[in-house]
Image (cartoon, rainbow, N blue to C red):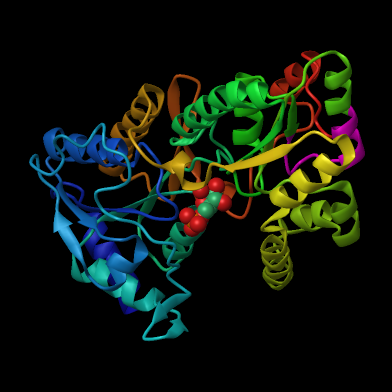
Amino acid sequence: MIRINFVNLVTSNSTMNKHIGILTAGGDSPGLNAAIRGIGKTALGIYNMQVTGFMDGFRGVMENRSIRMSGDNLSGILTLGGTILGTSRDKPNKMQVGGKVMDMTDVIVENYHKQHLDALVCIGGGGTQKNAFHLMKQGMNVITLPKTIDNDVCETDVTFGFDTALGIAVEAIDRLHSTADSHHRIIIVEIMGHNTGWLALGAGVSGGADVILIPEIPYDIDLVAESILKRERAGKHFSIVAISEGAISKESAQKMDILGKREEKETDDKEKQKTIQKELKNYRKKVIGNTMQLAKELEQLTLVESRVTILGHLQRGGIPSAYDRLLATRLGTACAEYLQNEQFGIMVAARGDGVEPVPLEKVVGKRKIVPLDHPWLECARRVGTCMGD
Ligand code: F6P
């Protein structure tokens, strides 16, 4: 009760200059600094707000580790990869503290009030949207921005970080072509993307991969081998297979009902969601090394020598592409305007060339997967790419 009165007291005086917090959470991705700069420069320069940056995601708010953002530390960061604020995968309600997992929500809410914040901007992917929503339900004013190289956040056309990672994966595929061709090999390139295929599909189509395997389409290894043998018969003695880290064979998908579980996870039943999440986590542990296994099996089935390249965190590092800088700046500067207008509880989504505020409850607990009728899939098939089905 007391806390609610306090929130009202702080936010009701809209003529006062506002004090906002910013944090970056989840896996880092190119464009985070461009977003921090966009929010910070607009908030300071146009709206005369006070801006505080919290270190290492939600942990920084819990531990009250913050820095005052100014023209100085917001300058020269547009082209930097990573995040000047640091990040972590810590969740407010499940944080490792002194060797124990604890619910630190109350401490975060308390620190938010102690700092006299009017709002907290949380920049992150699906997990961060959920954590921000959780804090919103505790009375905090939050606004989120969608970032992740996976591009799997709902209700936004695209997330920042995706374009840069896509460029890195495409460059890798381009380079792997010449070595695969010279040695007459199959090269399997594993691409990030968590449980969605946006990165592998986009990179596979742009890089001209011969086979693209994504989580949304469980693959039949015999069909993949046959497509490679078909190329061999046509005189093409090398093949590039772009595989998403979350791709699964038809066999395991059926055995463990993975697709069914991924769909069921979108339920509103929290307990059911937890159980399914645990099962999927266990499954992910089991599939580590799947790509190596696939290489071995393809070599046996085709008698073509195979090699594996796992791109891993290379896809998250380095300078953001022009597209990501532009997108992050668009979302960040618009975010400052929403803060000024006290439009809270929203994610700033990308819509065409503009932005749109989307209520957080429409975003959380959902994942944007590749629809089976997506134009990228259609064009991959049209140019003869094997999708493993
Ligand atoms: O969500 C971004 C991402 O890079 C995924 O593509 C990948 O599965 C995951 O993060 C890796 O996480 P971490 O950096 O914690 O190992």
Closest to the observer, 380 or 147: 380
State yes or no: residue 214 in magenta: yes
Report the quarter where the C terminus lies.
Answer: top right
Q: Residue at x 35, y 25 (%)?
A: 326
Q: For this rendering, which residue is in front, 329 or 218?
A: 218
What residue lies at 26% left-to-right and 37% top-to-bottom?
A: 80
Percent x, y of residue 193: 59, 43
| Quarter-of-image position of residue 224 | top right
Residue 156 in the image: state x and y as whole percent: 53, 35
As displayed, is residue 85 above or below residue 176? Answer: below
The quarter in which the N terminus is drawn is: bottom left
The residue at the far left in this view is 72
- Estimate the x, y position of residue 379 in percent, counting from the top left: 74, 16
- Which residue is located at x 88 percent, y 26 percent? 229
Position of 150 with respect to 8 (left or right) is right
272 over 355 or under it: above or below: below
Q: Quadrant of residue 38?
A: top left
In the visual, does 358 lie left or right of 295? left
Q: Name which quarter of the figure residue 300 lies in.
A: top right
- Residue 169 against residue 99 in the figure, above or below: above
Residue 10 image offset from top left, x and y in percent = 22, 61
* Numbered marks: total: 0
Viewer can see residue 91: yes
Find the magenta span and give its range.
Answer: 213-226
Is residue 211 left or right of 172 when viewed as pictured?
right
Residue 389 in sight here: no
Q: Nearer the viewer, residue 227 or 36?
A: 227
Residue visible at 71% across and 58% down in the picture:
287
Q: Is residue 99 magenta?
A: no
